[in-house]
Image (tube, rainbow, N blue to C red):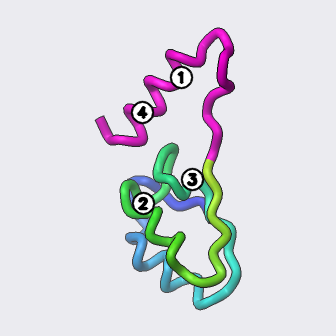
């Protein structure tokens, strides 16, 4: 599942209820890049949830510093 940051289709509690104890793979579970910001990390405490995150930057490359700044701004809602 890849949930929406704007919560236009419901909040994290609605998403958890939709799982109905089924196994599910959640994307952007850290909250950066989408997904019920900042609450999506709550799904990590649920049974049968396989959370994942993204690696938005490649370390030690040309644009690492600039990409990390953008990532920090998103992750911390700055």
Earlier in the chain: of badge 4 and badge 1, it is 1
- Badge 3 marks a residue whose secondary structure is loop
Pinpoint residue 9: horizontal percent, then vertical percent: 44, 68
Which sits in the foreground, 33 or 4?
Answer: 33
Q: Which residue is mark 3?
A: 28
In the image, what residue occupies the spot 43% across and 79% down?
Answer: 14
Are discs 3 and 4 less than 8 Å apart at CB?
no
Pinpoint residue 68: horizontal percent, then vertical percent: 50, 25
Q: Which residues are magenta?
A: 54-78
Looking at this view, name the residue that lies furthest to the front.
60
Task: Report, in whole angstroms, how far the alpha carbon at label 3 lies from the one at label 1.
Answer: 17 Å
Task: Report, in whole angstroms, how far the alpha carbon at label 3 lies from the one at label 4.
Answer: 14 Å
In the image, what residue occupies the spot 68% across and 68% down?
Answer: 25
Specify few, some or many for label 1: CA neighbours under 10 Å numbering under 14, 14-19, or 20 or more.
Answer: some
Q: Which residue is mark 2?
A: 36
Earlier in the chain: of badge 3 and badge 4, it is 3
Q: Which residue is mark 4?
A: 72
Are discs 2 and 4 less than 8 Å apart at CB?
no
Q: Residue 13 falls in which quadrant of the image?
A: bottom left
Are discs 3 and 1 less than 8 Å apart at CB?
no
């Amino acid at each position: 599942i890849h949930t929406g940051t704007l919560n236009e289709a419901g909040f994290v509690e609605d998403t958890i209820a939709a799982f109905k104890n089924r196994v599910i793979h959640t994307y952007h579970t850290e909250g950066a890049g989408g997904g019920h910001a900042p609450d999506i990390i709550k799904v990590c405490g649920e049974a049968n949830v396989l959370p994942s995150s993204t690696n938005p930057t490649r370390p030690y490359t040309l644009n690492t510093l600039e990409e990390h700044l953008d990532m920090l701004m998103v992750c911390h809602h700055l």
